[in-house]
Amino acid sequence: MTPSWAKDPGIGTQLINARAKTVARKPAFQSAVQERRCLILTGSYEWEVQGRREQPWCIRRADGPPFAFAGLWERWRDPEGRAIESFTILTTTANALIASTIGCR
């Protein structure tokens, strides 16, 4: 997510996830927390480190329908006024089912 006040949209690559526990205190997310909440309908990948390699696990509903992540969105404008809309996913500690499936600690 690229905050509207950013000088360069490249900062967005560092803000792909926001921790739910601390998001309201982070300057990059404060405005979006108040005004631009969203649901992100999708599946997700979680990565488990296995020795020297990483194993991707697709997190989705087993019965097929999509599920939603809590998210925040933002609109950034370049000097010419062109808009880039971006978002971040709110994350938290894995629940017991996910943690046991992919070995989250």
Image (cartoon, rainbow, N blue to C red):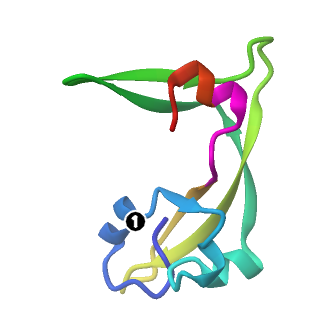
Residue 88 at x, y = what percent?
A: 56, 58
Name which quarter of the figure residue 10 lies in: bottom left
Q: Which of 10 and 47 lies nearest the eye of the viewer?
A: 47
Q: Is residue 75 above or below residue 51?
A: below
Amino acid type shown at disc 1: Gly
Query: For residue 57: magenta?
Result: no
The residue at 75%/59% (across/down) is 38
Residue 51 at x, y = what percent?
A: 24, 22
The residue tagged 1 is 12
Count neighbours of disc 1 (C-alpha within 10 A) and say few if under 14, some if 14 to 19, many if 20 or more: some
Query: For residue 97: magenta?
Result: yes
Q: Which of 55 and 73 lies nearest the eye of the viewer?
A: 55
Q: Is residue 48 left or right of residue 24?
A: left
**Is disc 1 placed on a helix, strand or loop?**
helix
The residue at 80%/21% (across/down) is 65
Q: Is residue 3 left or right of residue 40?
A: left
Q: Is residue 2 above or below residue 105?
A: below
The residue at 50%/80% (across/down) is 28
Q: Which residues are magenta?
A: 91-98
The residue at 60%/83% (across/down) is 25
Numbered label tally: 1
Q: Which of 36 and 19 lies nearest the eye of the viewer?
A: 19
Q: Is residue 36 above or below residue 31?
A: above
Q: Residue furthest front?
A: 105
